[in-house]
Amino acid sequence: MAQVLACGAAVVTLSMGIRHGFGLWLLPITQEMGWNRQSFALAIAVQNLSWGLIGIFAGMVADRFGAFRVLMGGAVLYGLGLAGMALSPTPLVFTLTAGVLIGAAQAGTTYAVIYGVLGRQIAPERRSWAMGVAAAAGSFGQFLMVPVEGWLIAGLGWQQALLALSLLVLLIVPLAFGLREPGFTAAAASVRREQTVLQALSEAFRYPSFNLLMAGYFVCGFQVVFIGVHMPSYLKDHGLSPQVASYALALIGLFNVLGTYVAGTLGQRMPKRHILAFIYFARAVAISVFLLVPLSPVSVYVFSAVMGSLWLSTVPPTNATIAQIFGVQHLSMLGGFVFFSHQIGSFLGVWLGGYLYDATGSYDIVWYIAIGLGIFAGLVNLPVKESPIRRAPAPSATSATSAA
């Protein structure tokens, strides 16, 4: 278990850590290339959609054949996408590389795939805790990588910084070997499964709690990606230095290490729907207070610490709830569908941020939407039923023979 948890956490640290720093490239790229903010925001929005959509199929492959092949392919695509992002001459090419390629890479190197491995390899009584550890690793990656990315941009320039990251992300390749699953051999893959993919999907989408979890995760995506991508520009527009933005994003990552670990641990002891509702309500309160108080480095750092403790803390209880309801046989795929909802929210959050800024000269409307959605998500998570779904027993081969 230790090897699986360590390698999974390291993969998430790299993949999510690099991804969380993309907001630092918004101003350098748009200013040098002469693009507007919406062009950059659209590429990151497409990245989130690509990540979510391809994540469904990456989850299916990981459930069927194990995570190893998916991780290897994702690492190569990540390196190619970062290099292409550095060398893109037009917004269209930038959208294809920073958007489609990197989105596909993240689908194969982040939570849905890693959580499938954890769900299959770790006992149910420790599953929520293990998912909290993996999510905390992603948060530590943000704390570690965002300042590194800021230093790389300052020291090398934005293009060379991206090329350096394209090499660094290939460290996922050796880590993938630590996540090879012995049960996924050619012989094991041919064994008849209890449910087909279509049966699992039909069951999930007919179950109201699955749809409520998807609705909440939509809001999570909207909030965190809007803040992660647009807050550096929001702060600069209000006269604060780029260093404040770098430290703010790093603080989000640091405090999210604690928040995700606590959420995962509490998920073993109390109803996970209550944890999720609290997180979404608390986000709405935190954003409201942030907008009401005078903006200063101190207020930014306090807001970042509070939001950090709530940032990805939705991930362990959401995925552990899916595993608890439906089991682990199709966990990566079902987690991929819920995450696709998250990424639709991410698309709207990052794109609306750019669109409404260009249209109004302000991010205010998007902040207000984020508050309203937080209240909505808190309410829809309260009625989620966490108990395992009851299935009619499948007829055994012996029974079928006797009946014949």
Image (cartoon, rainbow, N blue to C red):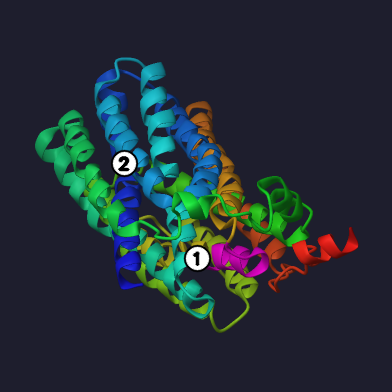
Left of 131 or right of it: where is 157? left
Category of crowding for the residue at label 2, using alpha-carbon neighbours closer than 10 angstroms: few (below 14), some (14–19), many (at least 20):
many
Relative to the observer, which residue lies in front, 120 or 366? 120
| Amino acid of disc 2 | Ala
Left of 396 or right of it: where is 84? left
Category of crowding for the residue at label 1, using alpha-carbon neighbours closer than 10 angstroms: few (below 14), some (14–19), many (at least 20):
many
Question: Which dot marks residue 75?
Answer: 2
**Marks 1/2: CA–CA distance:** 22 Å
Residue farthest toward the right in the current orientation of the protein = 403
Span highlighted in magenta in the image: 316-328
| Amino acid of disc 1 | Gly
Give SS at disc 2: helix
Give SS at disc 1: helix
Q: Position of residue 137 (x, y in %)?
A: 33, 63
Residue farthest toward the left in the current orientation of the protein = 155
Relative to the observer, which residue lies in front, 207 or 146? 207
Left of 102 or right of it: where is 394? right
Q: Write the residue at 79% across / 53% down.
A: 206
Magenta-span inclusion, residue 327 = yes
Relative to 373, residue 255 above or below: below
Figure quadrant of residue 138 = bottom left
